[in-house]
Image (cartoon, coloured by chain):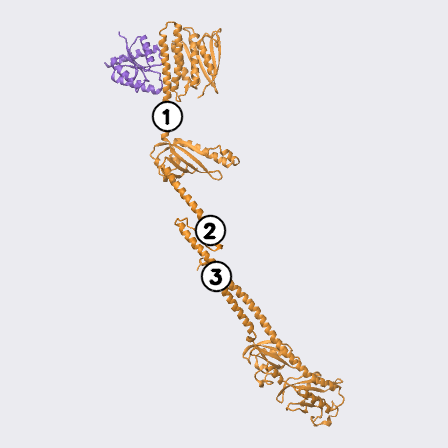
Amino acid sequence: MSKIKVLVVEDENIVGFEIKKRLKKLGYSVHAVAKTGQDAINKAATTYPDIILMDIMLKGDMTGIEAADTIRQKHNIPIIYLTAYSDEETILRAKETNPYGYILKPFKEEDMKITIEMALNKHKKEMQETQ
Amino acid sequence: MNWDETPLKLKLILYITIAVLFIMASSTAIIVSIVTTQKIDIEYSRSTEISQNYANQFNADMRENMAIPNTVARSLERYSSDDRFEINQKLEHILRENPRLIGVYVGYEPDAFDGNDLEYVNADYHDETGRFLPFWNRIGGEVDVEPLIDYDTEDYYQLPKQMRTDVVTEPYLYQGELIVSFVSPIIVDDEFKGIAGVDVSLDYIDDSVHDIQVLENGYAMVVSNSGTLLSHPQDKNAIGTTNIMDLHDEPVYMLLADINEGISGHIEVNDPITGKKSIIFYEPVDMGNFAFILSIPKDEMLADAIGLRDKLIIISTLAVIFMGSMGYLIALSITRPIKNIVDSFGKVSTDVSKGKLDSRADTDVAIDFKDIPIGLNEILSILEDYASKLKESNKTMQEMRVVINSSQVVVFLWLPEDKWPVEVVSDNITQFGYQPEEFTSGKLLYADIVHPEDLHKVEKDLDELVAQHTYYNGTKSVQKNKIIDTIPEYFTSEYRIITKSGDVRWVDERTLLRLDQNGTVTYLQGIILDITDRKQAEDALLNIEKVRKKEIHHRVKNNLQVISSMLYLESEHFSDPEVIESFKNSQNRVRSMALIHEEIYKSEDMRSVDFTDYVNKLGVYLLEAYNIGNGKIQLNLDIEKVYLSIDTSIPLGMIVNELVSNSLKHAFDPAENGQIDIVLKSKEDNYLLLVSDDGKGFPSHVDFRNTDSLGLQLVNTLVDQLDGTIDLESDDGSTQFKITFREINKV
């Protein structure tokens, strides 16, 4: 069984690098780290990740929520938000994009793994239901 | 004509003329009365005096006439010669010596002279009785002698015989001659012997009286006591034959009565002789039975007085005319300059009414009135000055009105009453959709347009300011000036109003309290300015500021997260557990700081940290970081809801981080259950932080203030940074750090 391909979207490269390291440590394959929303949309279209970890606050004109919304409309890829934001407004905006889970910063490897696995499982079930 | 409308000139003339007329008439009347009375008195006195003089003269004549028989009688009383011839000769001599005598005579009782009457019966100048009765007379023109007649019956003999006194008879006609007899009795040894007498013609009376002319038509006459005329100014035949009563009417009786009583006087009658109203003065002649009469026509007697009266009246009339003329001239001298001034004032009035305020009254007037036009001109100058200033002020006001109405500042004059009725409002209230008349008519009150949510606050603030002024001006007048300085004169407030179309606009109100002398607020005069744009700009700025701060904290937090990531990545290169632990500790420290910034940018004011929430998150994080998420170690928080500044929060958060980490690492054995308590309480400005665990207790040989442990060193350093104190209570079953501090840069 091939490794799960993860697309990490994080505007801070070093943080992205840490996530990438932690994900690899957990057994996932990280093909790319996108820095902006548009970059994420492009990389999602070219790398076909199994799952996307999306930071909500991104540099540039597009937020992670907006990028996730676009990707969701184009591709059937589960998306998990990475966020330190826990305010009501952000949560509400994020909910509207029907995410598969949240990973709150600072990261905890166990949480990351559980959340990713649950998201993939949920997605798999949805796919099966659709078929 | 209405008296008030009568010209002053006419009034003055009337006043002066009437006054002069009254004074002259009354004074003339008094003078005429006094002078006429005096004159009449003088005339009466003069006439009376004339009468008395004539009467006295006649009296003297009569006395003189009586003196002759009296002397003869006295001589004969002493005569003893009995010589009828001698006596005759003496009588003849007396007659010849006194031409005015008509007759001289003696008459003896029978045989009373010499006892020889028989001897002389019918002898010369004797009658048949022979009595001695010689009567020497010049009745026939020549001196002759004849015996007396009618001696037994006539008064001339009988009256002296009976009365034994000198007698003057009533005038009587004797042979066509009016005569009067003066008779003296001859008494020897108290026995009446006979009489001695003289007859006097009274024609001389008429002669002497006839020529008397008093004034033009006055005349004199003499009447006997019985009223017989003894003289007449015109009719000689009336003498001796006519009685005065035949000439006059009744008042003459009084005259006769007075004469008989020897009383003088005068009466006023219509004199038939002159045919005029006359005054008849009468004066009895003592010696003789007659009176002197003086008749003077009244008009002639009073002519002088009447003439004087007429002259005085003429003088008075002339004086009145003269004074009237003078009055006219005086009135003219007064009214003419007044008229000139009035005309001048009228011209000024017309000019001023036409706006020509530079018009001036003519000052070329009489010296007495000069101050009037000068005064008016001074007033006009002041008025012109005021008008100029007023014009300038109006111009400025008009300009100000234009400026105000073209600006956004709406000017109001409110009454300090419930809901603030509007007295005046500038036209530019239309910018809010309202017409000024809606307010000034009372249809709308100002409170009606204030936003209901702001109305209560505006009312409260304004009422408080008004009450402060009323209180300090009303009851604390002594210290008013001192205290009033501390009370704002202006009411300022920012609130919302609702426009006519229902929009909400923010306004800035600045209102001056207008006070009366008693310090009572009479008006509120102020402006409102639409500050909606400013408010929106302020809100936008606040939002920008908020976003900016949020961004900064977010960025700081991200950077800390990057540092944390780098520490993690760095730790991946080491295998030594101590090194990895050190990296983890540092990572946790950075995380505890990052959490602070996360809390801050989540907070409303971007300045303070909800410490309860923070400690809660930090605790959860630390439990997870040390892989104690299975519930063995329970974290109990008793954190008072406090918001601390970032300067306090960061060191305090790190202290909590170090102490909790310390407990998690050292207090419990693996697989041991336990609990960690974090308590934060405040008392006034002081805070108490307790971090305790029920683990194995702090090693007694370790001095927490002086240890190699970096964590405790940091704790001591950070407590010092907070100016706080730290104490440790520990035994075998528990460890408790007690930290007190005061907040730094309190929010």
Which residue is drawn at the image coordinates 41% and 53% (left, top)?
A: B347
Give the left or right position of residue B201, taking residue B581 as reference. Answer: right
Name the quadrant containing residue B397. Answer: top left
Q: Quadrant of the N terminus of chain B?
A: bottom left
Density class for disc 1 (Cα within 10 Å; few <14, some 14-19, many ≥20) is: few
Name the quadrant containing residue B183. Answer: bottom right
Give the left or right position of residue B147, taking residue A83 as reference. Answer: right
Which residue is drawn at the image coordinates 37% and 22% (left, top)?
A: B546
According to the picture, the residue beneath numbered tag 3 turns out to be B329
Chain ID for purple: A
According to the picture, the residue beneath numbered tag 1 turns out to be B541
Residue B628 visible to the viewer: no
Of residues B93 and B153, the one nearer the viewer is: B93
Q: Please tell me whether residue A49 is drawn above or below residue B127 in the rendered image.
A: above
Disc 2, SS: helix
Chain ID for orange: B
Q: Chain of mark 1?
A: B
Q: What is the CA distance from the residue labelled 2 to the residue labelled 3?
A: 26 Å
Q: What is the CA distance from the residue labelled 3 to the residue labelled 1?
A: 94 Å
Of residues A20 and B329, the one nearer the viewer is: B329
Q: Single out the mark in the foreground, 1 or 2.
A: 2
According to the picture, the residue beneath numbered tag 2 turns out to be B374
Please say if the residues under marks 1 and 2 sit with CB atoms less than 8 Å apart. no
Residue B49 visible to the viewer: yes
Q: What is the CA distance from the residue labelled 1 to the residue labelled 2?
A: 70 Å
Of residues B575 and B259, the one nearer the viewer is: B575
Circle 1: residue type: Leu
Disc 1, SS: helix
Q: Single out the mark in the foreground, 3 or 1.
A: 3
Q: Please tell me whether residue B316 is drawn above or below residue B527 in the rendered image.
A: below
Please say if the residues under marks 2 and 3 sit with CB atoms less than 8 Å apart. no
